[in-house]
Image (tube, grey):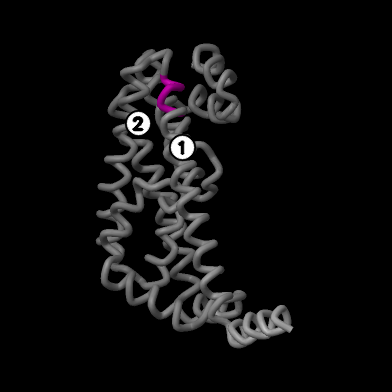
Amino acid sequence: MTAIAAQPVAEEGAAPQWINDLMDTLGAPGAGIAIALENLFPPLPSEVILPLAGFAASSGRMSLLAALLWTTAGSVIGALALYGVGALLGRDRTVAAAARLPLVKVADIERTEAWFLRHGTKAVFFGRMVPIFRSLISVPAGVERMRLPVFLGLTTLGSALWNTVFVLAGYALGDNWPEVTRLVSTYSKGVLVVATLAVLAFVGIRLLRRPGAGRRRRGGDASRRR
């Protein structure tokens, strides 16, 4: 597969060569390993790995069913590892660490925790379809000790849906599979922009609400009037 797949990847400049080598050497299990690593290290390009696996299946380098099963297994294994990180940290350590962050209050953490307790199942399921959060959502699930069978079931279902869409797209497009990468990259960038704006809004509001912020503004206005 290396000679066939490497050319479109090189044109896109998005897929490290080791991903091609891994799939070329191990086939579908290699795609699963790449996706597991993508969960642990989100900068790895899942939008390349999945359609590339579909393209490999269309060229006969692996079976389509194996590509779907192994990429989903890789997603679950990666998510389970992050769940374990959250479980090892535990609530007390997480709260203590977060409370030391600038502009973060214990009340913020408690509200987030309450939200997750109410909506955690939906967050885990739908989070599998949102870039960046697809990996991160496993950590609070572990911190809150979501029942493991529930976590695994939701993760498997959500990951299977996400992976199937992009593996099948790569399978259907064949040599044109990089088109999937461009579309998903645009989606990922949109999510990142929204997340960045939300963080900036949180920081701005928190700064404005800090004690003395109003007095400093009023003092500055009085100085200008004089």
**Residue under the image location 74 percent in, 84 percent down:** 226
* Amino acid at pointer 1: Ser
* Amino acid at pointer 2: Phe
Q: Element type at marker 2?
A: helix
Dot 1, crowdedness within 10 Å: few (<14), some or many (≥20)? Answer: many
- The answer to if 174 sits in the magenta stretch is no
**Residue 6 at x, y percent in the picture:** 55, 18
- Do the residues bearing badges 1 and 2 touch, measured as CB atoms within 8 Å? yes
Residue that badge 2 annotates: 166
Point out the residue furthest to the front here.
226
**Label 1 to label 2, Cα distance in Å?**
9 Å
45 displayed left or right of 70: right
**Residue under the image location 45 percent in, 57 percent down:** 136
* Res. 152 image quadrant: bottom left
166 displayed left or right of 225: left
Relative to 65, residue 210 above or below: below
**Residue 32 at x, y percent in the picture:** 42, 37
Q: Element type at marker 1?
A: helix
- How many marks on residues? 2
Residue that badge 1 annotates: 46
150 displayed left or right of 205: left
**Which of the two labelled residues, at mark 1 and mark 2, occupies the earlier sequence position?**
1
Relative to 70, residue 210 above or below: below
Viewer-nearest residue: 226 or 62: 226
**Residue under the image location 60 percent in, 25 percent down:** 13
Please, what is the dominant secondary structure of the magenta stretch?
Answer: helix
Relative to 57, residue 70 above or below: below
**Residue range corresponding to the magenta coloring:** 177-181
